[in-house]
Image: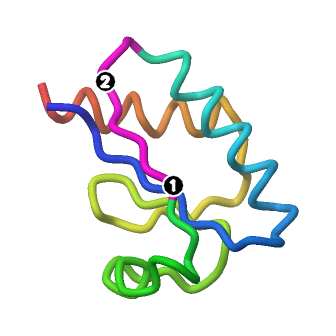
């Protein structure tokens, strides 16, 4: 089963654009099908954002849990995903 990854962004957030790039690069490093990625505009998907506990943008939810990230870095994200994927097997 693929790891569920959700990115929550707001329309005019410059940090969101940079986070998106790093996140997509980290996902591209993983085997095909390892991750199911969804991106949510918090304005359009407010109910889902509240459900998982989004407090600011950008926010990342992995397997339905908000991740507190000090840095949106490809390697940090890749390590996070690798840890989750190892737990599932």
Give SS at disc 1: strand
Using a 10 Å C-alpha cutoff, classify the residue at mark 2 as few (fewer than 14 neighbours), some (14 to 19) or many (20 or more).
some
> Residue 34's x, y, as percent?
31, 24
- Tell me where residue 12 appears, x and y as whole percent: 83, 72
Which image quarter holds the N terminus? top left
Please say whether residue 38 is one of the residues in the magenta stretch.
Answer: yes
Q: How many residues crowd around disc 1 within 10 Å: few (fewer than 14), some, or many (20 or more)? A: few
Region rendered in magenta: 31-39
Instruction: Tell me the CA gap for discs 1 and 2.
Output: 16 Å
> How far across and down, in percent of the image, does residue 53 sit?
41, 83
Residue 26, relative to residue 64: is it above or below?
above
**Callout 2: SS:** loop
Q: Quadrant of residue 16?
A: bottom right
* 22 up-or-down from 41: above or below: above
Mark toward the viewer: 1 or 2: 1
Residue behind mark 1: 39
Question: Which is nearer the eye, 47 or 2?
Answer: 47
Q: Residue at the spot x=87%, y=62% of the render?
A: 14
- State left or right for residue 22 relative to residue 68: right
> On the image, numbered disc 2 is attached to which residue?
34
Looking at the image, residue 79 lies above or below residue 61: above
Taking 68 as reference, is 77 above or below it?
above
* N-terminal-most mark, 1 or 2: 2
């Amino acid at each position: 089963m693929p790891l569920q990854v959700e990115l929550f962004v707001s329309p005019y957030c410059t940090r969101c654009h940079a986070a998106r790039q790093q996140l997509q690069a980290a996902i591209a490093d993983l085997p095909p099908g390892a991750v199911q990625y969804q991106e949510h505009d918090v304005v359009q998907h407010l109910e889902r954002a509240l459900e998982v506990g989004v407090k600011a943008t950008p926010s990342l939810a992995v397997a339905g849990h908000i991740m507190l990230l000090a840095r949106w870095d490809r390697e940090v994200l890749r390590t996070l995903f690798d840890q989750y994927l190892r737990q599932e097997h």
